[in-house]
Amino acid sequence: MSGAARAKTEPRAWQRMLSGRRLDLLNPSPLDVELSDIAHGLARVARWNGQTNGDHAFSVAQHSLVVEAIFRQQNRCNADDCLMALLHDAPEYVIGDMISPFKAVVGGGYKTVEKRLEAAVHLRFGLPPATPASLKAKIKKADQVAAFFEATELAGFSHAEAVKFFGAPRGITLEMIEIAPLPATLAQQRFADRFEALERERGPLAAAV
């Protein structure tokens, strides 16, 4: 088969972003990662497949803000740690939010793409390609606390169900987090604002990346 024929038959493996970047999904480059695209995309990806109460979807951008806030409450951490918490679901600006039961069915292919995207995002902002295991576990703990409150307050889970799947939150109360779903544009702005605040804490070297 000629090169021209292959070009016509091979599926497109990149996505055009509103920034104008073309992000290769199979081999993403940090040079094609833009914070504006991440904030825009995550603010329009619904948690829980959109099955939540309220006039607006509970977005991954807002979830990320909640997780980072809980992470700060639970740990002594620096700005790099907090940024990795804020960006823990960043690949979903490209691949969407897949609920855990479906991830288990899909298997390794999804995880491979997710890890490559995570590495590209991290490298773009001067972070390690992969979140260190000990830090990842702490972020996961904050993620589970956020999931508990989202499940019980927004997604119709009973308290017992939420405890079974996510564990009982300790040291964090509903009053400490903002769980009411925000409009997409507001969630987008708050995500971007928090990112910029953390970049200022990280200093000029991080900002220059």
Image (cartoon, rainbow, N blue to C red):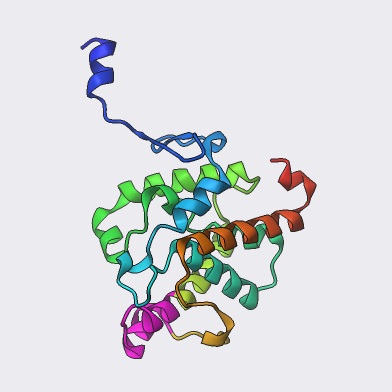
Which image quadrant for residue 195?
Answer: bottom right
Image quadrant where one finds the N terminus: top left
Across and down, in percent, residue 131 comes to 56, 55
Relative to 24, say whether 130 is above or below.
below
Relative to 163, say whether 78 is above or below.
above
Can residue 130 be seen at all in this image of the molecule? yes
| Magenta stretch, overall SS | helix
Near-viewer residue (84 or 36) = 36
Relative to 148, say whether 16 is above or below.
above
Query: Image point 57% across, 47% down: which residue?
Result: 35
Across and down, in percent, residue 206 comes to 72, 47
Query: Image point 37% across, 79% down: which residue?
Result: 154
Image quadrant where one finds the C terminus: top right
Which image quadrant for residue 153?
Answer: bottom left
Q: Is 203 colored magenta in this rendering?
A: no
How many labels were placed on the picture? 0
Near-viewer residue (180 or 60) = 180
Which image quadrant for residue 70?
Answer: bottom right
Across and down, in percent, residue 162 comes to 36, 83
Q: Is residue 15 left or right of residue 4?
A: right
- The region drawn magenta spans 147-167
Across and down, in percent, residue 152 comes to 38, 84
Can residue 138 be seen at all in this image of the molecule? no
Q: Is 155 colored magenta in this rendering?
A: yes
